[in-house]
Image (cartoon, rainbow, N blue to C red):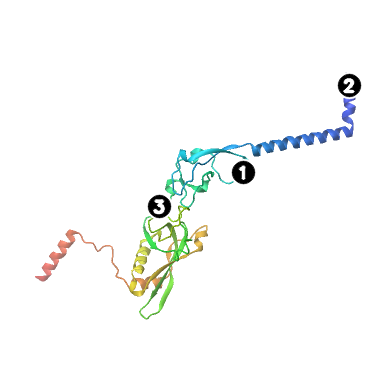
Amino acid sequence: MRGLMNGLRRFLSNKNTVTIIGVFLGIAVLYFGYQWRIKQATNPVSIPVAKETIQPRTRITDDMITFVNVPPALLHGDYISKLSSIVGKYASYNTIIPEGSMFYEDTLLEYNELPDVGLINIPEGEVAYNFEVDMDSSYGNSIMPDGYIDIYFKAIDETGSIIVGKLVSSVKILVVKDKNGQHVFENTEESRVPTTFIFSVPEDIHLLLRKAKYMEEYSAELIPVPTSETYAISPGDIQISSSYLKNYINSKSVYIPEDTVETEDDTTETENNNEEEEE
């Protein structure tokens, strides 16, 4: 036994032996580590995918989803792996989910995130405005919901001179619809032509736009222009850009105060006062 221990000690004390053992251990570590990495990358995991093509603004139900096994190496981005995080949500208004596609965070919306819901939650003091457009004024259908525009005013004054200038800036588009009231960007299988931008503005700007629209005698025109505010981290607030244009438009209209409505008692009192004056 002692001889065996001495032989083993001499064997391990040999530098060549130690080197060979180290090399074999290193190879073993690399081999088994590589096998483990391959297994982790190729061992399939079950992922929910669309069982059918899901159109924008569609509420997703259980029967629209199936599961497939996917190698982890092919999984990228903010994909959703839990069925409970998909069912009950809506496909985004400008996204179509193809059959067999995985579900991603940015392609699904809660109900209260849908575009039309934004019309219900218009800030206090603002009102919705329908802005008529066509393919040209929408810049070839390139102005989308959540984008920003400036509104320019053009008219011909009494002297025949052309007036052009920016009237309102930083207007956020809420909805883009076609002549049938359908959302232009919600379905990639149909070609829809924009006819209406819907946005909300404070009451004073709303009235100013209405007045400008009705100035047909002066060939008035409101022109939407895309703005870089669409890509800004903190877009500017909506505001009137030109006091000159504001005053010009108001000078062509009659100011109607909001307190002009008379009650029945006020009318009776006015008539009595008039009768007393006549006597």
The quarter of the image holding the C terminus is bottom left
As rendered, which of 190 and 254 lies closer to the eye? 190
Q: Which residue is mark 3?
A: 116
* Camera-side residue of 67 and 26: 67
Residue, far left? 279
Where disc 2 sits, the SS reads helix
58, 27: nearer the viewer: 58
Q: Residue at x 39, y 70 (%)?
A: 221
Compared to residue 175, the image places residue 69 above or below, namely above
Q: Measured along the vertical axis of the image, is residue 75 above or below residue 136?
A: above
Identify which residue is drawn at 78% across, 36% down. 27
* Residue 55 image point, x, y percent: 46, 48
Please, what secondary structure does the residue beneath circle 1 have?
helix
The part of the image, by quadrant, that contains residue 271 is: bottom left
Pointer 2: residues within 10 angstroms few (<14), some, or many (20+)?
Answer: few
Mark 3 and mark 2: span between their CA atoms? 87 Å
Query: Would you call the spot at circle 3 few (<14 residues within 10 Å), some (14-19), or many (20 or more)?
Result: some
Expressed as whole percent of the image width and height from the top left, the position of residue 241 reads: 43, 68
Q: Give the position of the N terminus as an image quadrant.
A: top right
Q: Is residue 61 left or right of residue 81?
A: left
* Disc nearer the start of the sequence (2/1): 2
Residue topped by disc 1: 74
Quadrant of the rendered image containing residue 267: bottom left
- Tag 1: amino acid: Leu
Hey, what amino acid is under mark 2? Leu
Q: Residue furthest bottom?
A: 159
Q: Position of residue 146 (x, y in %)?
A: 46, 56
Q: Residues within 10 Å of mark 1 (few under 14, many from 20)?
A: few
Identity, as a three-letter code, of the amino acid under mark 3:
Asp
- Between label 3 and label 1, give the one nearer the viewer: 1
Task: Tell me the quarter of the picture where residue 11 sits.
Answer: top right
Q: Secondary structure at mark 3?
A: loop
